[in-house]
Every structure is written in C-alpha cells, then in structure tokens.
C-alpha cells in the first residue's frame, strides 16, 4: 500500500501539467483522460528505471508525449481524420474547435485548428520549451522537420488569428523588398 | 529581402542566424513588428489556461495498478530481503538437522508428540492472524510463498514417512516447527505493517 500512497502523491503533484500537455496535443477531453491514465500507469510501472540524469518532470513529460504521439499516429485517430493536401481536415477542424472552451478564445481556437503535428510541435517548442533536437527525437525525424513544422504552425496561427480578428487575410512575408 | 518565419523564430529563440538577417530585422519595421508579434504570441501561448483532469482519474489509475501482476511492479533487488530470509531459514533448518543427527539416540515417541503439538499450536496462531492483504511488499510475499512451499514439501515427506523410522519422522517434524515459526513471524510482521495489528504478539518460546 505504501507504493500506492507514494504514487498518489506523485499523481496529485504532476497530473495537472501532464493532463494540460496531453490536452493541448490531442484536444479531445475524453481521449486526453484515457491517455493520462495510460501515461501514469506506464510511469508507475517504470518509475524504478528512472535515472536522475534529468528532471523527473522531464522524464514524466516524455512518457506523456510519447503516449499522445502514439495516439496521433494510430490508425484509430487517423481513421477519424480526413487529411487534406496541407494535412488539415475541415471536419477535424470543426470538431477540434468545438472542443475548445470558451468559444471566443481566438488563440485557443486557432491552436486547436492546427494540423495535429504542427500543433504538437508549436506546443512542445514554445510552451514546454523543448529544443528542436528533442522534438526531432520524439518524432523520429530531423531537426529541420521540427523547424519547418514550427514555422508552418506559426504561419497557420497568424492566418487564423487575422481571420478571427477581421484583419488582413493574407500578409505573406516575401523575400523581396 | 525580408526574413522568413524560420529566421524570425530563430531570432526570437536566440538561436544563431546569419549576420545579414539580424541586421536586416533590426532595421526593417515590417520584420521588426513580425518578430515582436511572434514574441507576444509565445507569451500568450504560455498564458493559456491549464486543464484539470477529472476527479475519477486517480481511482481508475489506482485500480489499473492494483490489477497489474505483482511481478511487473518490482525489480530483482526487491527480492533481496526475501532471499536473505529464505537463506536464514534454510541455514537454521540445516543446523537443526545436524544437531538432531548428533542426538540421534534420543528419538522417541514423546519427543515426536511434543513437536507435533508445537506445530499444531503454531497452525492455530497462524489461523488467528488477519487475512493477507491484496497488495503487499514483493519481498514479504516472496518470503511467505517460499516458507509455504517448504512446509508443503515437508508435509508430503511426512506423509511418505508415516510408517518409517522414528528418527526420520522426528527430523521432519522439527524442520516443520522451525518453518512454521518463521512463517508466523513473517505473517505477524505483515499484518502489523498493514495496520491489522493482532491482539497478541507471537510468543513462540512458550509454544
């Protein structure tokens, strides 16, 4: 029972940041709840393997991100998403935006409507402060992939936010003055 | 030539970019304002609210942990105390047997009967202890399993030796008393650790 009490303490301390991270990556609350459970079961099963070479929260976060990315890559998730040429599904966008509360939160909505991979990269880099190298490792890709996805995410965010605010719909940065 | 998104993001994050890009952004109102916007956006992303998991999440995780096979939650070194305990019991049993070997001539019905009675009293003490918890330390569980297995083996040997020589029977009953003694100690410690402290402490000297 001692172990379970200790596990509960760890859960109480870390569940909020871990759940927030998962929610930001997968958006849907029901899926995020399930992934949160999976992540903590995995954490407690392998907690003795944790070596104090990095922060404990960092180690916990890597497990949570792996779970979320596995879900995003799974046929079950992809089966519910019709990917367009740019990786965005209008059906998926609507579902994602509908999951955002409150609905008038422009940034929340713009973030939720990003393609899943771009959203994950922008969140992991800009909020969780992961480096491009760390993100690349999580995705099994190169740092160029991470940098390109981040730039792409910001381009989408700007377009979406300008649309929401009624501003100019297009203000591309040309490489020509 | 204006900076592109990747260059502006690199500038925002303080990662190296070409000197000409930095100079351009420093002197270009459009790129400067875009850089400021990206910094603002990053700050706003940080300010987005956190989410609280549902209250029922922990009970569900706990339930899943309790359902896991016990072995998955332990590492080999967790069995070290159990191995030490089992080794101690085995050594004591061996010493007891050696001592009996030397005092072979003293085997008689009265001695055997005395050992049987002690074994029965230890069984009775064991039955008064609370039931075993569903979740417990792996080391304790392994030690108890080891002792119970050894007792079962002894019982089989006692059945086979029921009409054998008295010396052999006495040795087996002696070993059984030793093992029962150890088992009661471990079970008592287990019950005490789980808060089910029994009404009496095991006073085996009297038994």
Image: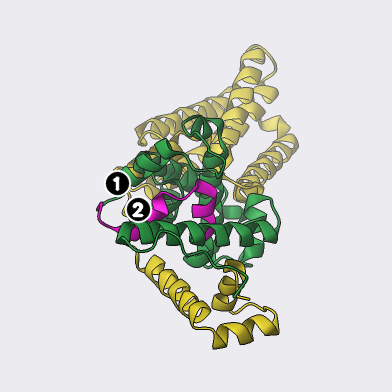
* Quarter residue B164 falls in: top right
Q: Nearer the viewer, residue A84 or A75?
A: A84
User: Can you identify the residue that label 1 sits on?
Assistant: B54
Q: How is the image coloured?
A: by chain
Q: Secondary structure at mark 1?
A: loop
Considering only vertical position in the picture, is B75 above or below B42? above
Q: Position of residue B176 (x, y in %)?
A: 58, 31
Magenta span: chief secondary structure: helix
Answer left or right for A8 relative to A60. Answer: left
The chain displayed yellow equals B
Q: Nearer the viewer, residue B30 or A56?
A: B30
Q: Residue at x 50, y 47 (%)?
A: A116
Q: Position of residue B170 (x, y in %)?
A: 63, 27
Answer left or right for A6 relative to A125. Answer: left
Whether pointer 1 and pointer 2 mark residues with C-beta atoms closer than 8 Å, the reply is no
The magenta span reads A102-122
Asked if marks 1 and 2 fall on the same chain, the answer is no
Q: Residue at x 38, y 63 (%)?
A: A168
Answer left or right for A121 relative to B40. Answer: right
Assign the N terminus of chain B to one quadrant of the image.
bottom right
Assign the C terminus of chain B to one quadrant of the image.
top left
Q: Which mark is residue A109?
A: 2
Residue B182 appears in view: no
Considering only vertical position in the picture, is A51 above or below B102? below
Q: Position of residue B4 (x, y in %)?
A: 60, 69
Q: Colour of chain A?
A: green
């Amino acid at each position: 029972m001692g172990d379970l009490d200790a596990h509960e303490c760890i859960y109480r301390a870390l569940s909020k940041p871990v759940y927030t991270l998962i929610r930001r990556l997968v958006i849907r609350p029901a899926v995020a709840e399930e992934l949160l459970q999976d992540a903590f079961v995995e954490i407690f099963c392998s907690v003795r393997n944790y070596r104090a070479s990095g922060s404990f929260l960092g180690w916990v976060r890597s497990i949570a991100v792996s779970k979320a990315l596995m879900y995003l890559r799974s046929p079950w998730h992809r089966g519910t998403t019709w990917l367009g040429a740019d990786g965005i599904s209008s059906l998926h966008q609507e579902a994602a935006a509908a999951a955002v509360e409150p609905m008038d939160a422009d940034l929340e909505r713009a973030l939720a409507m990003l393609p899943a991979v771009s959203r994950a990269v922008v969140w992991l880099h800009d909020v969780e402060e992961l480096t491009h190298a760390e993100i690349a490792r999580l995705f099994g890709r190169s740092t160029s992939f991470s940098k390109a996805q981040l730039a792409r995410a910001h381009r989408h965010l700007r377009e979406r936010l300008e649309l929401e605010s009624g501003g100019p719909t297009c203000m591309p940065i040309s490489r020509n003055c | 030539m204006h900076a592109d998104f990747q260059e502006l993001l690199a500038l925002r994050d303080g990662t190296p970019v070409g000197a000409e890009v930095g100079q351009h952004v420093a002197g270009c109102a459009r790129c400067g304002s875009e850089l400021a916007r990206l910094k603002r956006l990053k700050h706003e992303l940080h300010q987005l609210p956190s989410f609280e998991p549902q209250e029922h999440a922990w009970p569900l995780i706990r339930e899943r942990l309790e359902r896991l096979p016990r072995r998955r939650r332990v590492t080999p070194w967790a069995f070290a105390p159990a191995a030490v305990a089992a080794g101690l019991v085995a050594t004591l049993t061996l010493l007891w047997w050696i001592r009996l070997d030397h005092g072979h001539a003293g085997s008689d019905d009265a001695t055997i009967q005395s050992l049987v009675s002690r074994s029965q009293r230890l069984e009775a003490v064991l039955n008064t202890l609370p039931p075993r918890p569903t979740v417990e330390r792996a080391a304790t569980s392994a030690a108890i399993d080891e002792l119970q297995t050894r007792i079962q083996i002894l019982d089989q040997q006692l059945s086979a030796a029921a009409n054998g020589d008295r010396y052999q029977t006495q040795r087996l009953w002696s070993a059984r008393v030793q093992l029962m003694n150890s088992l009661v100690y471990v079970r008592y410690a287990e019950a005490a650790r789980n808060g089910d402290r029994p009404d009496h402490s095991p006073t085996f000297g009297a038994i």
